[in-house]
Amino acid sequence: MPGRTFTAGGPKAAARSASETGNSMNSSEREDLANFISMISRDETPFLSSIGRTKAKAVFHEWQTDELAAPVDGAAADGVSYTTQNTAQAAEPLRTRLGAYCQINSKTITVTGTKRAVDQAGVADEYAYQLKKRGIEMKRDQEFGLVHSWQSSVASGTRKFGGYQSWINVNIVNALVAPADYTAPTNTGAGVAGTFANVITSDLVPLSLSHVDVLMQTIYEQGGKASKLMLSPANRRAFSARAQAAGSTGSNAGDGNVRRNIDESGALRQSVEIYRSDFGDVMVVPNYIMGLTQTLTGTPGAANFSAFLYDPQWFAWATLRPMQEVDLGQLGDSIIGQIVEEGTLEVKNPRGCGLIFGLSGA
């Protein structure tokens, strides 16, 4: 049998072409379709999976933070008066009340009666399959809001929770060539996002180990101790490249203190998974959602420009309504359903985390 050239659609499409319709062998062939469906998209949610869980009881979820007074010479005179001690106590930091609005995430499912009745390859029940698929998509949307956008916590219109960047206004390493192009949030109590002014590609710089070291020190001096460095795929590669660089110069000078090594199995290790800094060990974690897109139109929307340095214990997803299916019933010959979840990001101590902003991903 002469060979066939497969066109768009693969072997099946080519075998059903007009020129071969009358071929008795082809007309009797059964299609060879595997009885499973491979989902090509990733379903991980690295940031959401790393933080804790708690319960929200109102649309505006609130919590409190406190801090110790700065260390001082604590010597007290013999017989010191109550007034003197009380004055000193009154000067100590007060508890701070923080809060964020809960956001509703939702997906709908519509499946016709015919779709549920026919025997489909890889799918036992089309509605159940779509329900599972939409649930995974909604979790990815949730991760997107947490790490990818600079959205603030708002009550008017469509409620939104404040993402990671909207809580960081103290521990920031602004790597931009023109630092004034980025203004940090002024009120973390409301989860207000930072602002941008004319950020252009030439303002961005490659990630350097010095960025991480400076931010680790800043967080440590604020009383925190970061344990995770979360990066987009591009910045993850950049970090390993800086750590593995030998004899680097210029902006990366001093980064060439780590060498590639071959482990006991004979594998060549290129990546750096644990970074041992002067202020503790940090696990380096890639997050594919942080690098999905880039926008440089005054308000960058991609976390590919930034790196998160944080301690997961200071974060939690506060659930007002857990993910659930809402059966909307029958509409004509279709069954309709909806998946709904409502919650917000709780940042227990914004000073325990930090942000490196202005990275080029190279």
Image: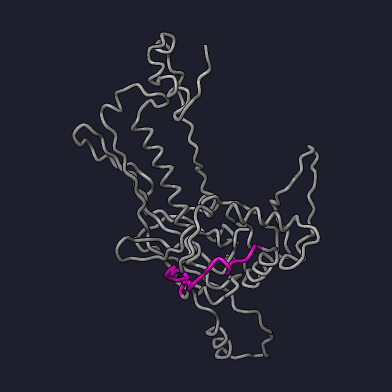
Q: Position of residue 138 (x, y in %)?
A: 41, 47
Nearest the camera: 358 or 62? 358
Image vertical order of residue 289 relative to residue 199, above or below: above
Residues in magenta? 187-207
Outermost top residue: 24
Q: Residue at x 35, y 30 (%)?
A: 126
**Left or right of 178 on screen, residue 136:** left
Q: Position of residue 204 (x, y in %)?
A: 59, 66
User: Which quadrant holds residue 232?
Assistant: bottom right
**Left or right of 128 on screen, residue 206:** right
Q: Residue at x 55, y 88 (%)?
A: 87
Q: Quadrant of the C terminus?
A: bottom right
Question: How does the figure colour the protein chain or chains?
Answer: one colour
Nearest the camera: 262 or 317? 262
Nearest the camera: 248 or 42? 248
- Dominant SS type (magenta): loop
Q: Position of residue 334 (x, y in %)?
A: 24, 34
